[in-house]
Image: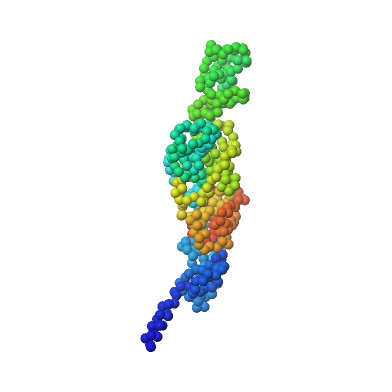
Amino acid sequence: MSNLHDLLKKLSVSSVSTMSYVYYHKENGKIHKISSKNIPEEGFEIFEVENKEVLPILTGERRTEEFTITYDISLKQIRLKEVAYEDTHKTASTMCYQVPVIKNSPCGHLALEHIYEGIDVFLWNIKYGYSKGQCVWYKNNVYKLATNIKKNKVFKASIHILFIENVTLTTVPTQSHSKEKMQLSPEYDGIFVDVWYKELSHLAGQYVWLNDNVYRILRDQENNTEFTMDNATLLVGGVQLYADENESLPTVKNLKDGCIILKNNSIYSVNFKPQQFTRDSASVFFYNTPTMLLYTMLLYYNKYKCFQTNLADINSDIIETDILLELLDSTNLPNGQIILSGTDLYLTQVNKEYDIIVQQDTINKCWTIKLNPYTKKFLLSSGYKPTETLYFSVTSKYDPNILYKSLKFSVADLLSDTTSVVPFTYDTEQSKNNVSIYTAKYFDKYVHEII
C-alpha cells in the first residue's frame, strides 16, 4: 500500500500546472485576479505567466496593486511588471530624456532609393502633346510612348510600351525640388528698342525691331515710308518678341535655352538654370510636361486638388486646375512599393530604426508626431493603454529648465488615423537651431526631425 500511496502522490504533484493566468484591464493594465484556469471573462484580457512570477502575490507577500500588465516597447512584448515610481513619468531621469535630432528630412520613417535614373516621368494630361520615347504615368502604370500623342487625344495604352507596373502617387514630399527655371539676362544694356511701325516717323539713332531683327536707323525717316536697309544697320538678329505694350502683336510664349527676346523694349538672353523650391520643401510636386509643374494641396481625405504653373513662362501665374489626384498616405506605404515623386521613380523602404518621430515643421509652422508603421501595427495587435498621453517639452537648446511650450499627444490618436498636429504659437518654435525636445521615455527610440 505504501508503494501505491507514493505513486499517487507523485502523480498528483506532476499534474500541477506551472502556469498562472492574470486577468487584467486592457485600458490601464490593472490586475483583476490571478487564476490557475484560463476561462475568458467579459471585460478582461488574460495574460499567461509562469507561477514563479506571481508567487509573491499568490502567497500574500505582495498585493496585486503593486504589479501591472504593460507593453514593453524595447522588448516588443507584453509582460508583468512591478509598479515603480518611475512609471508616473515624473522622475528627473525620465522627464529629462533629450530627444536626439536627425537630419532634415520630410520623409519620416521612409527611406527612398532612386531607380531608373535619367528617366523623367510625366503625368499624362489630355490637354498636352507628348513625343515618342517620353515616359508618362497613366492609371498607376508608366508607359514609354511608341508614337507622338497630340493634345486633346485619348491615351491608348495598347499601342504604347508598358514600362513599369504598379507605380503609386503618394504624399511623400518631392525629393528633388530643383528644376530648371527660366532666367533673363539683360543684353545691350541701356538700348531702348521700339517695334517698327510704318505709320510712325523714326529718328536717326533710334533702334527698332522688325521681323525678329533689331536695327539702328541711320537718318530721320518720315511716317508712311517703307523700311529699307539703305537707312538701317543690323544690331542683332534672331530676336523674338516676347512682350510689348501693344498686346495685339503676336508674341512667343515657350522659349528655349539660349534664345534672344525683346521684352517691353529691352533685349534679354534666356537661360534655364536649376532652382530650388525651398519654400515648398515639404510639398508634393508632379509634372504634366517638362515645364508644366503641378503643386498639390489636400482637399479632403486622400484627395488633392492641383495648382499649375508654367516654368517656361516668366509671366505665368499659379492657377487652380480641374485636376484631382488621389494620393496614398506615406504612412501606409509597404516595403518595395515604386512611387513617382516629381519626375523621378523611387523604391520605398520602411525605416524600422525609430519608433516615434517628433517633427518640427518650420514650413507649415506646426508640430506633428509620427509613429513607425511597424510599431503601430504591433501595438494595435498587442496590449496597449489607449488612455496613455505622451508629453513633450520644447525648451531652450540643451536646457530643460527653460520651457517654451508643452506638447500633448494621445496614444489612442497615434494608433488611429487621427492627425496629431499642434500649431506653433511662438516665434521661438520656428527656429531650427535654438530648441530641444525633452520627454518621459515611453518608447524605445525617439528622434526630433526638423523640416
Residue 394: give x, y in percent of width and height. Answer: 57, 54
Q: Is residue 166 above or below residue 353?
A: above
Tally of numbered tags: 0
Residue 18, image x and y in percent?
A: 44, 74
Q: Position of residue 163 (x, y in %)?
A: 43, 40
Quadrant (top left/top right/bottom left/bottom right) for the N terminus: bottom left
Residue 120, how many percent across, how many down?
Answer: 46, 38
Rendered position, 414 above or below 198: below
Please tell me which residue is depicted at 58% across the width and 54% down the height of the picture: 418
Q: What residue is at 58 percent from the left and 62 percent from the top?
A: 387
Which residue corresponds to the image point at 57% horizontal and 57% vertical from the top-left?
A: 413
Task: Choose between 150 and 90: the one closer to the eye.
Answer: 150
Residue 362 in view in this figure:
no
Q: Nearer the viewer, residue 3 or 170?
A: 3
Residue 308 visible to an observer of this rendering: yes
Q: Is residue 30 left or right of residue 50?
A: right
Residue found at x 58% / y 18%: 196
Looking at the image, is 353 positioned above or below residue 244?
A: below
Note whether 260 is above or below 25 in the view shown: above
Farthest residue, direction front: 158
Q: How is the image coloured?
A: rainbow
List the single residue furthest toward the left.
Answer: 3
Q: Nearer the viewer, residue 26 or 213?
A: 26
